[in-house]
Amino acid sequence: NAGVMQNPRHLVRRRGQEARLRCSPMKGHSHVYWYRQLPEEGLKFMVYLQKENIIDESGMPKERFSAEFPKEGPSILRIQQVVRGDSAAYFCASSPAAGLTEAFFGQGTRLTVV
Amino acid sequence: DAKTTQPPSMDCAEGRAANLPCNHSTISGNEYVYWYRQIHSQGPQYIIHGLKNNETNEMASLIITEDRKSSTLILPHATLRDTAVYYCIVRSVEAAGNKLTFGGGTRVLVKP
């Protein structure tokens, strides 16, 4: 059973470009979470999605960031018009159900904005 | 979710037990204690969780005080691969999904 797969592992974008980060949850998991870790800082929750629905986006910046988890395919975190401050590690996690189950994390995508 | 307090760092000798404390004095009755760790540059890894009873699995033991205001994660025989940042997280049984609020954690360095 493959773990949570994130790609790409490393992504370099110029200021103003778009960044698309993909996350394939573990098989059978329908709940996906995105976290951001700025350099030398802790992990911050961004958004929680269940198939085709955004459940909690309280940690998402109000502009330029969006997330989706379509019925088919991976979850996508999209950052439009990237700025240097978006440089960070973005981690995706999945769980099989809501509630008190453990979350399984991917290895992250390291975004560098130049 | 209740706030947790952990020491920022600690060293441990390889082969010895590592005892990682966590204070959660405002924890409420329906909140669980979770532990995750993050090895450098990797995604966080679940370790263990508990409500009020002590718990043990293949990775660690979790000791929760009777008043539930603090807990200790025990790594019985620390290895160099246990060097990581360890996060103590309190989660409500009523929380939606598996949203985790990470604090600063404890940076554990296992030394040979």
Image (cartoon, rainbow, N blue to C red):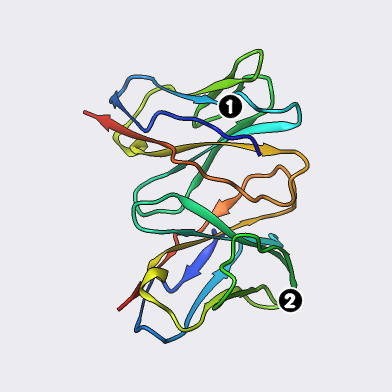
Graded by Cα atoms within 10 Å as few (under 14), some (14 to 19) or many (20 or more), the crowding at tag 1 reads some
| Corner quadrant of residue A112 | bottom left
| Total number of numbered discs in the rendering | 2
Q: Residue at x 23, y 29 (%)?
A: B111
Graded by Cα atoms within 10 Å as few (under 14), some (14 to 19) or many (20 or more), the crowding at tag 2 reads few
Residue A77, percent across and down?
56, 73
Q: Residue at x 72, y 28 (%)?
A: B28
Q: Chain of mark 2?
A: A
- Observer able to see residue A86: yes
- Observer able to see residue B74: no
Q: Kindly identify the amino acid type of the residue bearing the numbered disc 2.
A: Lys
Q: Secondary structure at mark 1?
A: loop
Q: Which residue sits furthest right?
A: B94
Residue A29, percent across and down?
68, 60
B97 or B56, nearer to the observer: B97
Residue A15, percent across and down?
36, 83
Residue B2, percent across and down?
63, 34
The residue at which mark 1 appears reads as B24
Q: Residue at x 64, y 19 (%)?
A: B68
Q: Chain of mark 1?
A: B
A13 in relation to B40, above or below: below
Query: From mark 2 to mark 1, how far is it between C-alphas?
Result: 39 Å
Q: Secondary structure at mark 2?
A: loop
* A80 left or right of B65 in image: left
Choose mark 2 or mark 1, whichever is in front.
Answer: 1
Q: Which mark is residue A71?
A: 2
